[in-house]
Amino acid sequence: MAEFNETDQTPTVDPKTPNLGDSTTSSQPKPEQITTIDVAVPIPDVGPQLQVVVEEFILKSGSDDEEVRTAATNELRDFIEHEEIGITTLLVVVKYAHEVKNVDLLDAFCERVADLIKDKKVVEVREIFGIVNDFTPGEEQALRYEHPWAFED
Amino acid sequence: MANLNSSNQIHNDIPTKNRVIIHFRFQSRVITPPSSIKQNLSSNSSFLGLDDTFTYDIHNAPDSDSLLYEILSRLPLKSVFKFKCVSKHWQTLISQRSFSQFYISRSNTASCSLPFRILYRYMYDRKIEDILDRFRPESYSSSVLYLSRDQHLDIKFKVLAVSNGLMLCWSFSNRVYHVCDPVTRQWVTLGRKKVYNYGPSPSFNWEGFVSRVNEDNVVTSYRVVRVGKLKSPSNYLSLDMYSSETGEWVDYRLPCPNPIAFPKHGAGPISFNGILHWFIYDHGMVAFDPYKDPKSCRLIPFPADRDAQSEVTHDGLYRLCDGCQGKLRFLQVAPDTDSFYCFSMWDLKDYDKGEWCSEFKVTRSDLSSSDPELKSWLLKATFLPLSFHPFDLDIVYLRCVELACVVSYSMHNRKLEVACKPTGVDALSWRVVVPFMIPRWPTPVPMSPVP
């Protein structure tokens, strides 16, 4: 599944130059080495199907062609909606996308999470995110009174 | 090459065509995620939450708040405020000014539709609540002109003005003013005026509306100012003013340097830099700052080289005077097709001296359009100015009478384009519309003491 992307001919670091993994780089933090990858992108385990989809998306999101990127985004959105990927899994990818700073991936997954939680009750949202309620009943009630329009159906 | 580390050794064995070079649009490196993420995956889903109890990374990692920003900013506003109740952390985060700014800027860029409308002032419905329902986010059609009109209902409301997210409305049936937040649909009714102190009461109208905001962009107070109708030119301007801080109407009678009279229709006012300007018959504007003490008024003449006659003949219908992005501009449209210049615009360069500067004058033959029908009418159509674009200094909206459509005029390339074709409204002019930025965040209505 590896593709050689022509437009990536001139990356910021030429992968063919040897990684001077001797004295000059030994003091540098390893996790940030520029990597050419011949193995799967290190996405956390989200299930094989989704992993493949996310990997492919990441590849395409690096494309210079806007049409390719837009098509990839639409495909990704359709996939996660159609497969009804659960919020927990979505959040794993959100976190990953945030760390690798892939804006399009982050956008697609955050939108989906937002879409799934927007109509949920406050207690349900707490459960999903593993949040303990630290309001007293009085405090929570006061908040509800402050924004009654937000609690209308 | 000596000293190649093992990873490069492997890479050199792979045929070039099988290498994958990962590029991100904004970053050209792969930053491998901390290895600890792998060990948590098989564990309980509650470990994958993004709040204080999330154990994935450092407790309260800076990451988790920015992730929450990304998710919360994609929620509809109602959900955002509902989720303030989730936890104190979420409440604090949502209440931060940086969050509201992030949310608003995302709303404005993310939505592909227009962030503003030209609102037709008259709305027909039974109650103010129903009027405010029409400002739900889903109610805005894609048309530039927001026309909300049920002809079979005769209970009428008029949107008088908008200031810092608050809307001032008049109820014709109850004869009261409402100040509303279209986002939360919260509204208050202004107290009625008790007594007029200067003799027989003139009729007060032509309401102006200004408000003050604090550094968090929350409206702290507002004032509604009306002028008293004058039967004949007078050296005194009668005003009354409602202040949200007192909940009361106060009368003023201010001396004017020259006698003033108001036109029968279209006296305005417009609000510019927090100062209200009413159009006075024939020669210009009278300006009043509701927040300045001692109270005074000032006359500002219109550009001297405008077509003053047309103003009088057509009751100011062919001119548009309003502020945009800190500039006060005067656009005049020639009523006749044989006038040399069709559009003329001035800018009030020196507000204090009242000095206008001519921005441009265009003839009909200078105009163009990509719409064939409009193009064929350019030399002979009647254009009436409607409104400047709320924030784009290059655009002004006009009505093309013969084609019954709203057109946009782009000043830099002198192009007219059809913006929309509204139906069910006649007599569309600047007087019956108000430019309206669609609010993206609630504006609590300041409460007034009950006098």
Image: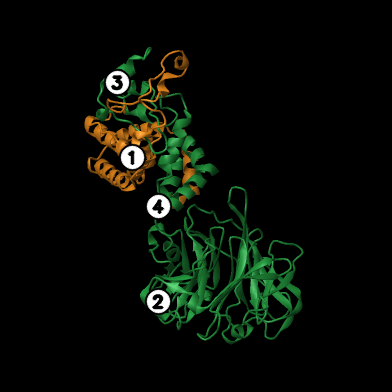
Chain colours: A orange, B green
Residue topped by disc 3: B12
Check if mark 1 and mark 3 are on a common chain. Answer: no
Residue topped by disc 4: A152
**Nearest-to-viewer mark from 2 and 4:** 2
Q: CA distance from mark 1 to mark 3?
A: 26 Å
Q: Secondary structure at mark 2?
A: helix
Q: Where residue B124 sits in the image (x, y, percent)?
A: 43, 72
Q: Are marks 3 and 4 in contact (CB under 8 Å)?
A: no
Mark 2: give few (<14), some (14-19) or many (20+) Cα within 10 Å: many
Regarding residue A135, the answer to whether it shows in the image is: no
Q: Where residue B319 sits in the image (x, y, percent)?
A: 57, 77
Q: CA distance from mark 2 to mark 1?
A: 42 Å
**Nearest-to-viewer mark from 1 and 3:** 3
Residue topped by disc 1: A61
Relative to residue B50, is residue A22 depicted above or below? above
Mark 1 or 4, nearer chain start: 1
**Nearest-to-viewer mark from 3 and 4:** 3
Check if mark 2 and mark 1 are on a common chain. Answer: no
Mark 1: give few (<14), some (14-19) or many (20+) Cα within 10 Å: many
Q: CA distance from mark 3 to mark 4?
A: 63 Å
Chain letter of mark 4 equals A
